[in-house]
Structure formats: structure tokens, C-alpha cells
Amino acid sequence: MVATTPLSVRYSTASPNVVTDTVDGEAIAIRMDNGAYYSFSKGATVCWNLIRSGVVPSQLAENHGADEQALRVFVESLLAESLLRPDEAKNAPQLEEVLDLRDIDLSFVHHLEMTDIFAIDPVHDVDPETGWPMGHVEPHRDHGVER
């Protein structure tokens, strides 16, 4: 078996547990299995969308100037957060535009403040009196405010 690096593998979003969208040029991703959500810098959004569409990350370094070490850390972080999964069956898209990915910010932030809300099961965690989904009563993680 040939050893592969995270940069030589084709990926897709770790569906159905991960949903993602891009709003005003910045991506967000939500892990539906644990309620964690992530926001991406503009540069990371470009790479996130390309990688999950099937572009092999090494192409971003070789053909578009992305820093290979930063790209490796980025992909490894996405894998560690279970946002990506290897998908060698995925077809590689044709990149028709010329991308300059030199010196881009490949950061994303893991947010916790809404984890309890996103993790609510709207079918089973419903208040019997109001019919609205409800979470467990715990102190709010960020501000110490009780719900």
C-alpha cells in the first residue's frame, strides 16, 4: 500500500453530519451530531469550498501558490474536527479561474456558544406544554447566564 499525505487525497464534506453554507464570502459549517459550528476566514472559505468539492489539496499548493505547510495544518485540522472525509470516488472539478492563494489566511474558529441549541433534537426534546424544542437547563457557557 502506498502511503498518502492529507494533501494527496480527494475529500468531501462529512455528510450527513456536517452542513455548510457560504454567506457574504465566509463559510460556516455545523456538525449536526454534536452542535459545534465553525466560521472560516475568507481565504479559508475559498480553500474549504475547493477541497470539499474534490480538488486535491496539493493542487492548491502546486498550481495556485498556497503555502503547503499551512494547507497541511488546515486539512489536518478539518479532519480532526470531522468536517471532511476522504472521498476518492468524487470527481475532481475543473478549475477554470486563475487563483492566487499566496499569503492567504487559512483559519477557522470553532464556536461553542450555541452548541446546546444546535444539539437539540426537535422531535424528542420538546416541551410538552408549548410544543417548542427545549434544551437541558445548564449555565450558559459564555456568559454564565442561566437559561
Image (cartoon, helix red, strand yellow):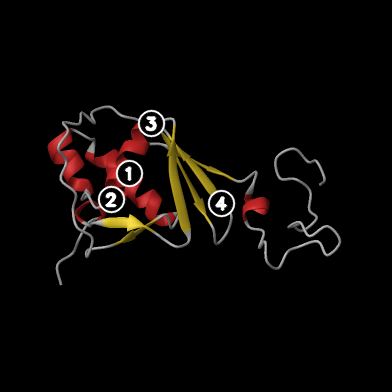
**Which labelled disc corresponds to residue 42?**
3
Q: Which residue is mark 1?
A: 49
Q: SS of the residue at dot 2?
A: loop
Q: Is residue 41 above or below residue 31?
A: above
Q: Is residue 53 left or right of residue 77?
A: left
Residue 87 sits above or below residue 81 on the image: below
Residues at marks 2 and 1 touching, judged by CB atoms closer than 8 Å: yes
Q: Which residue is mark 2?
A: 53
Q: What residue does disc 4 label?
A: 36
Locate residue 108: give its quadrant. Answer: top left
Point out residue 85 in the picture as x, y percentages from the top left corner. Answer: 34, 60
Q: CA distance from mark 4 to mark 3?
A: 20 Å
Residue kind at label 2, given as amino acid type: Ser
User: Circle 4 — which element?
Assistant: loop
Counting residues from the N terminus, which is met first, the one under dot 3 or under dot 2? 3
- Three-letter code, disc 4: Ala
Asked if residue 54 lies left or right of residue 136, the reply is left
Crowd rating for badge 1 (residues with CA inside 10 Å; few <14, some 14–19, many 20+) = some
Which residue appears at 28% of the width and 56% of the height? 11
Amino acid type at circle 1 is Asn
